Image: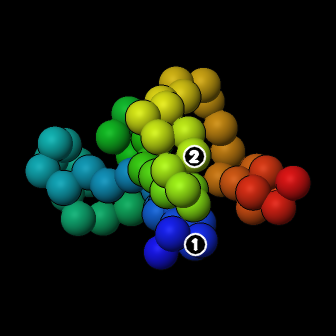
Amino acid sequence: LDTTLVVVTSDHGESLTERESCRFTHDPFLYEETLRVPLVMRFPEAAFAGTRVDAMARLIDVLPTLYE
């Protein structure tokens, strides 16, 4: 684990019981809880530990950024 980069993400957020109209479905409306997705990274040797970035990002950019 000391030499492994671990990345955890999702393709979309999830609205479970927040909204009656989209309970356990893929609703066509754009709500905050479905737009925000997790992106958690653990770098080798605890590089960047505790860093939080509030800037908007797209999932399509994750792999090219990691590759770079």
Q: Residue at x 19, y 55 (%)?
A: 16
Label 1 SS: loop
In the rendered image, the vertical position of residue 35 relative to residue 26, given as above or below:
above
Q: Amino acid at mark 2?
A: Ala
Which residue is label 2 attached to? 47
Q: Nearer the viewer, residue 25 or 55?
A: 55
Residue 41, image x and y in percent?
51, 54
Q: Amino acid at mark 1?
A: Thr
Residue 26, image x and y in percent?
39, 62
Q: Residue at x 16, y 42 (%)?
A: 18
Q: Residue at x 57, y 46 (%)?
A: 47
Which residue is label 1 attached to? 4
Q: Quadrant of residue 24?
A: bottom left
Q: Which mark is residue 24?
A: none
Label 2 SS: loop
Q: Residue at x 57, y 60 (%)?
A: 44
Is disc 2 surrounded by few (<14), some (14 to 19) or many (20+) residues within 10 Å? few
Q: Nearer the viewer, residue 21 or 58?
A: 58
Mark 1 → mark 2, Cα distance in angstroms: 11 Å
